[in-house]
Image: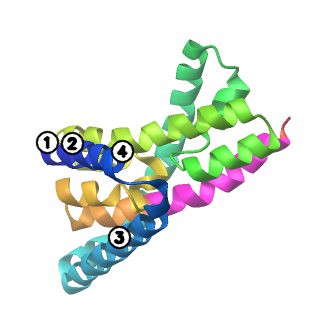
Amino acid sequence: MLSVAVSLVGGLLFGYLFLDTGVKDTLDLILMSALDVMIFIAGIEIGSNRGILKRICNLHSALLALAIPLAVACGSICGALLLGHIAGLSAYDSLLVGGGLGWYSFSSVVISAMYSTEIGTVAFLANMMREISGFFLIPLLVRVHKFLALAPSGAATMDSGLPVVIKYTNLHVWMYSFINGLVLTLIVPVLISWLLSLR
């Protein structure tokens, strides 16, 4: 956990002090390339490990792969309603914010364009903070149960949250992490669109 915190804080300070916004595209390219390489290598390890393949290629594993993102989505919505109520947001606005499920770049833009810039900004900040907090919560939650690592980052468990999941769990959990992020990413546009249609 300490190494993750040091890396994140170090990156924040380096970016703030030494880099300008002109290098953002280059950094995005490096990040995505590194993620692609990491996923490719993890795929090789999984493919060469027949035991993992046997464990995930059955009905129980398939149901678990669907149940995890649905549980994360339900927990996200309930948490958003509770925290939104405490913060003074309406139930509808809280649902929109929580409906981002960690995908801040999509939900904030759509909510701002189709409903409210203010709530879109809240959605951006809430979902971005969710992704960042995942870096710190995952190392703690895996001590209780490895699958709890899939909840904090939400949709980000298939990209930016994936390295932390891999570091603190195993390849078996990694597969569920990727599927969790993928399913949540597919749910977000449908959920946000449906909520906006209720206005």
- The disc at residue 75 is none
Residue pointed to by mark 1: 2
> What is the distance, in whole Å, between disc 4 and disc 3 at their CAs?
23 Å
- Image quarter hosting the N terminus: top left
Q: Is residue 57 above or below residue 81?
A: below
**Which mark's residue is nearer the viewer, 4 or 1?**
4
Which comes before the other along the chain, label 4 or label 3? 4
Q: In the depicted view, which residue is nearer to us: 33 or 130?
A: 33
> What is the distance, in whole Å, between disc 2 and disc 3 at their CAs?
19 Å
Q: Where is residue 66 in the image (x, y as percent from the top left)?
A: 48, 58
In the image, what residue type sits under mark 4? Tyr
Residue pointed to by mark 2: 5
Q: What stretch is highlighted in magenta?
A: 181-197
Element class at badge 2: helix
Residue pointed to by mark 4: 16
Residue pointed to by mark 3: 35
> What is the distance, in whole Å, between disc 1 and disc 2 at their CAs?
5 Å
Is the stretch drawn in magenta largely helix, strand or loop?
helix
In the image, what residue type sits under mark 2? Ala
